[in-house]
Every structure is written in structure tokens, then in C-alpha cells.
Amino acid sequence: ASDACDAVLPILVPQALVDPLAVAKAIGRAAGSQGDKPLVACFMGDEVVRQPMAMLHKQQIASYIFPEQAARALGALWRYAEIRGKLVDWKIGGLVLNSDQGSAIALPAGPAQLGEAEARPILTAYGVAQPRAALARSAEEAGLLASEIGFPIALKIVSPDIFHKSEVGGIALNLGDAT
């Protein structure tokens, strides 16, 4: 809980005199006293760290096999904290409210994965830059919209029945004109 550190990253390289499971239990006990600082663990090894890493997981402590992975995770948490400091959002019912953008986006009901059409408004509300896009319901409308957007364009199929567009040939790239 000291102000002298911003995150906690214990690294264990198992040795004959060290019980990795006991170390995982100790990290779990200490996690409650570390305040609101990010905590990730690195347990290097294979079979000998499998059970201790499962215990860390049960205690909701992210664990990695390589220190580089743990450091990347801490970096991602830091970037996320910076973004959260600029944006305050709440999820209420089926809405995501974003105070920075002053907007409310209805979350689609049903699918566990969002397609591009459902994800775009959410990404826009969070300030994520995206290429221009439009939804066309016919070949003629696609040609007109493509001319407005500008060439070259990418054409992608949109269907609730097709999540992986590339697997069914539903993507055409670098189209240079409306034909």
C-alpha cells in the first residue's frame, strides 16, 4: 500500500527450496492489502507452476509465464487508467453513457460478439478514430456511397449470420471504382 510504488509484479523462478503454491497463497493474501494498485504475477516454469497459477486465477490475479508478458499487461493497465482518467462512463441497463462525449449508446441485445456495424458507434463515442464507412442495402447504393467516401475502398458483407467475413469471401479490398 506504499506510495513508493505504482504497481506490484512478483516474479517467481521456482527452485528446490521454494513451494510455488505457498508463494501463490501468500500473494493472494497480500493482494488485499496492496490498495488499488495493479497487481500481476509472473511464475516462470511449466508443470510446477500450473497449480499455483490456477490458484492466482481463482483469486482474480493475472499471472504470466514470462516477465515481458506481465510488463506488457501492466503497460496496458497504465494506458487504460490514463484513458479512464479522461473519460467517465457508466453502464446502465443497455446503455453506455460517456460523459466526455456527452452521448449515450444503446448496446445491442443478443449476440455476445459485436459486428463492425454494432461496434462503430461505441468506438466513436470513446473517440477511437475510424475510416469513413457507410451501410449500403443494394449494389447501386454501394456505388453511390463509395463515390462519396472516395476510392480505393473496401467492401464488406454485413449479416447477422456471418461473423467471419473473410471465411466466406465477404471482403473485397482496394476497389478503385464503382463497377
Image (cartoon, helix red, strand yellow):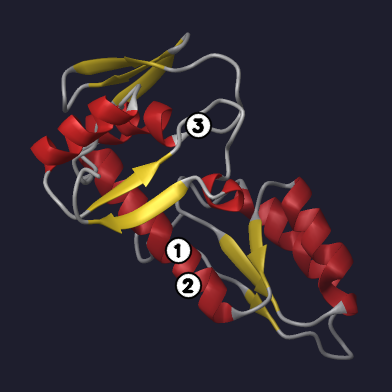
Q: Amino acid at mark 2?
A: Ala
Mark 3: amino acid: Leu
Find disc 2 in the rendering and name its residue.
Answer: 71
Residue 114, numbered circle: 3
Mark 2–mark 1 Cα distance, whole angstroms, equals 5 Å
Give the mark toward the camera: 2 or 3: 3
- Residue drawn at 89 percent across, 91 percent down: 16
On residue 74, the disc is: 1
| Number of other residues with Cα within 10 Å of mark 2, as a class: few under 14, some 14 to 19, many 20 or more | some
Task: Pinpoint residue 41: horizontal percent, then vertical percent.
Answer: 63, 67
Residue at the spot x=82%, y=90% of the render?
15
Q: Give the number of callouts.
A: 3
- Residue 60, relative to residue 174: is it above or below? above
User: Does 168 sit above or below residue 110?
Assistant: below
Q: What is the x, y in percent for residue 92? A: 43, 11
Q: Is residue 79 visible?
A: yes
